[in-house]
Image: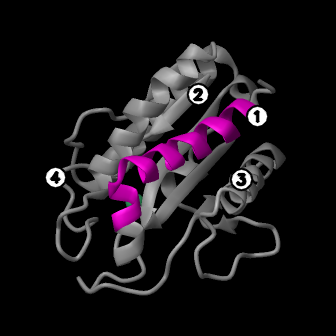
């Protein structure tokens, strides 16, 4: 069981490029709309936590509902048969300016399972192999650990991917192109199918 997590919503402020042309919520849903049928074609059952553009507010309601949705699927199908991948785009600042940081990063919760770590490492290694490394240092474990609500409070193996930077010009140009979007889809398809031994 694959549960894909959309990022934020159209009614969440910020979360866009400084010129406001690129929106994280929209990119995440576009990637998921391309990725879901590809995973289903490989025989996987795919769920999406909040497919609609708007999300319940305030943020705590949104995040706890996302986790309740994921954990409901976990209890129905078995935690070890599920994986949660929340698909985001990073930002170096919140000042509405362009920044220089580029590249892919993946997060797990601080006290996470070995399966979460394995999946996160696979994401980082694959992203580097695909040329998405960027210009930032990468921890020796290959993933970052932070107690983001949705990875901390979901029962199954869970990662949060930060797919390049929405406040870097080059990254935004790449993500907005069909080739860039296809690469992010391919990255997720590769790592999720590998997780399930496909
Ligand atoms: Zn985000």
Measured Cα–Cα span from mark 2 to mark 4 = 26 Å
Q: Secondary structure at mark 3?
A: helix
**134 in relation to 195, above or below:** below
Q: Nearer the viewer, mark 4 or mark 1?
A: 1
Measured Cα–Cα span from mark 4 to mark 1 = 34 Å
Q: Give the residue pinned by disc 1.
A: 194
The N terminus lies in quadrant: top right
Cβ atoms under marks 3 and 2 closer than 8 Å: no
Specify which label sits upstream in the sequence, 2 or 1: 2
Residue at 42 percent across and 36 percent down: it is 32
Indicate how the structure is coloured in the image: one colour
Cβ atoms under marks 2 and 1 closer than 8 Å: no
Q: Is residue 181 left or right of residue 107?
A: left
Question: How many residues crowd mark 3 within 10 Å: few (<14), some (14–19), many (20+)?
Answer: some
Question: How many residues crowd mark 4 within 10 Å: few (<14), some (14–19), many (20+)?
Answer: few
The image position of residue 143, as x and y in percent, is 71, 64
Q: Which residues are magenta?
A: 173-195
Q: Main secondary structure of the magenta part?
A: helix
- Pick whichever, 159 or 26, lies toward us: 26
Measured Cα–Cα span from mark 2 to mark 1 = 12 Å
Q: Secondary structure at mark 1?
A: helix
Specify which label sits upstream in the sequence, 3 or 1: 3
Count of marks, rendered view? 4
The image position of residue 194, as x and y in percent, is 76, 34
Specify which label sits upstream in the sequence, 2 or 4: 2
The label shown at residue 126 is 3
Q: Give the residue pinned by disc 4.
A: 11
């Amino acid at each position: 069981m694959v549960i894909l997590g959309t990022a934020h919503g159209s009614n969440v402020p910020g979360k866009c490029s400084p010129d406001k042309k690129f929106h994280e919520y929209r990119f995440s849903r576009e990637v998921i709309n391309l990725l879901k049928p590809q995973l289903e074609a490989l025989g996987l059952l795919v769920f999406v936590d909040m497919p609609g553009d708007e999300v319940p507010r305030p943020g705590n309601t949104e995040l706890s509902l996302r986790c309740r949705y994921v954990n409901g699927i976990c209890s129905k199908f078995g935690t070890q048969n599920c994986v949660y991948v929340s698909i985001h785009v990073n930002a170096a600042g919140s000042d509405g300016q362009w920044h220089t940081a580029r590249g892919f990063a993946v997060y797990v919760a601080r006290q996470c399972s070995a399966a979460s770590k394995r999946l996160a490492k696979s994401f980082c290694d694959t992203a580097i192999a695909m040329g998405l490394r960027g210009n930032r240092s990468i921890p020796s474990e290959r993933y970052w650990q932070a107690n983001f609500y949705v990875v901390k409070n979901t029962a199954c193996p869970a990662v949060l991917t930060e797919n390049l930077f929405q406040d870097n010009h080059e990254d935004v140009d790449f993500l907005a192109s069909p080739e860039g979007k296809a690469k992010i889809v391919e990255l997720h398809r590769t790592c999720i199918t590998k997780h399930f031994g496909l």
